[in-house]
Amino acid sequence: MGLLPSTRALAAAGLASAVSCGFVPDRPTFSSEVSADTRAALAEADVSASDVAAARIGGALELYFGSPSAPGYHLTDAWIEDERDPGDAWWELSDEAADAVRDGNERRFAAQIRAVRAAIEAGAAALPDLPRPLRGGEAQARFEAAFAPLVAGEVELGGLHPDSPTAADASEDDPSFTWGDEALRFWESYYPTLEESAELFRTRCLFCHGPLGAGDGPTGRTLDPRPRDLRDGIFKWTEVDANRRPTRDGLVRLLQRGVRGTAMPAFRRLSRGELEGLVDWIRYLAVRGETEQLSTYFACEEGDVRPASVERAYGTVWGRWDEAEDHWLAVPAGPSPAEVTAEVVARGAELFRGSLANCASCHGTNGEGDGEAIWEEGEEGERRRRLDRWGQPSHPRNLTAGVFRGGGRPVDLYRRIKSGIGGTIMPAADASLTDDDIWALVHFVLSLSRTGGEPGR
Ligand code: HEC
Ligand code: HEC
């Protein structure tokens, strides 16, 4: 027990693997039933009545995250005070992201927006019949519920909306608005609910990532690399410091780009609103999974499930996600193409093979992915590849192929080398490497595929 790192240290490392009870925290399930690993960990640890403990963790998860058919978040006192509801993440978006969502809505709901605008401009009293939106049955249903009196013709398009300040109280900052204004705003600022995003996930992602995001969908089971298990909050292709949670914008860019060289597709046709909603759902699966892991860890440590500890787990996990933006890795300006001289590349080659950066130990002297450091002795004394966090054998990239999963631009490679690759054996760069050193490594790596595998010189 004395060897246990403190909760804070665990949180900082983004890990919560419990040493005390042999708990490998990577398999929670999405229901009030806890995962088999959670059960096993509780049974093995010194937790009294472990089946009761498991049921209590399951009950707590339902309290904090709702059920599969009605997902949502338990609101903390601080959130209620700040009027924050992470289940309605529209309010978290940067101005730029919010504008991108509105632009996307202009296209996705073009027919609805056009029809309402035209009716307002023509001074019509009634709402015209709106066409059903593309990929938006839920949006239609939400509209009909929120605007029932308008749809039924009981109120006029130009009549004052009930939420509006009355004409006498309206000011320039807060003008009075009509049913028509509100109807227009509904479509222009449409943002999916958590349920809608879960549904989109079920149709677009489930066959690979599995219903609960465990990476075990029917197609996913046969893939290499396996689809990410989204329940533990660890991602590979982020824009943040090592092992930090990804930023919203980083995840949106990932979904737009896909992961080259793997089965993970690019989702260019989805609107920005739909992509932001998927990010909400990815975060939901992760926060829920991480909360189960950390609660189980606390229960193992404390010998019992304490409500205060589950609450602490919930807060700690949210803290990791909320501070993501603070750990965004700004990339310093690198050399211009003209400044990438043979000397820069040669310096990169030297670092790559040297003992400080030590890239060759895994990637091999010529970057072909055949270094010695990836091997270890298995349980039977056999030689086997080191495993990643998800139990998959490690394959350092063959850098001469020029296929970069996290993006092939110099800034992407800078991030990969500086921060390492989350969940894999590839470490963050040694802190004594300077920005120039990292840029030299980037350009050496790029030179490997340009020269068709010739060691870059
Ligand atoms: C055809 C299979 C497939 C589909 C469909 C798919 N993915 Fe993936 N996804 C993968 C694979 C494979 C990886 C792992 C890539 C790797 O390890 O480099 C992955 C990785 C990811 C990651 C982790 C990226 C990182 O930085 O670690 C996220 C997030 C993700 N997918 C989200 C989604 C979402 C959301 C959808 C649906 C809109 C989706 N995926 C659809 C196969 C798929
Ligand atoms: C301990 C082993 C190890 C070391 C040391 C290591 N790598 Fe890696 N590297 C890997 C593995 C494993 C992957 C593949 C990760 C994956 O896709 O899951 C990888 C992937 C990469 C990629 C591909 C990124 C992409 O977007 O596809 C680059 C570039 C890279 N490494 C460069 C480096 C450089 C430069 C160094 C030295 C500073 C280095 N690596 C050190 C193991 C290592």
Image (tube, helix red, strand yellow):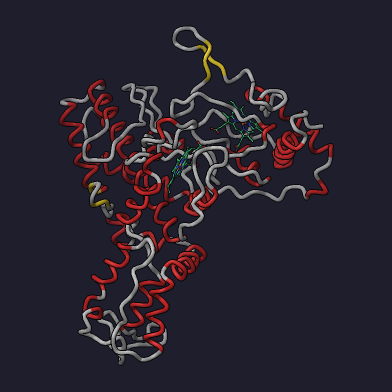
Residue 298: x %, y % from top left: 29, 33
Q: Nearer the viewer, residue 347 or 7?
A: 347
Q: Is residue 353 left or right of residue 15?
A: right
Position of the C terminus by quadrant = top right
Q: Locate residue 396: give its quadrant.
A: top right
- Location of the N terminus by quadrant is top left
x, y percent for residue 15? 42, 34
In the displayed structure, 198 sits above or below 152; it is: above
Residue, x 62% and y 24% (percent of image)?
362
Depicted 79 relative to depicted 378: above or below = below
List x then y, in percent, for residue 196: 32, 56
* Front-lying residue, 285 or 25: 285
Residue at far top of view:
381
Q: How many labels does the image show?
A: 0
Q: Quadrant of residue 35?
A: top left
- Above-or-below relation of 333 to 299: below
Percent x, y of residue 77: 27, 56
Q: Nearer the viewer, residue 1 or 131?
A: 131
Query: Is residue 337 depicted above or below 147 in this figure?
Result: above
Determine whether, in the image, residue 115 is placed left or right of residue 382.
left
- Left or right side of 441 for 311: left
- Residue 442 horizontal side relative to residue 42, left or right: right
Q: Identify the residue at image location x=36%, y=31%.
A: 26
Q: Residue at x 84, y 38 (%)?
A: 342
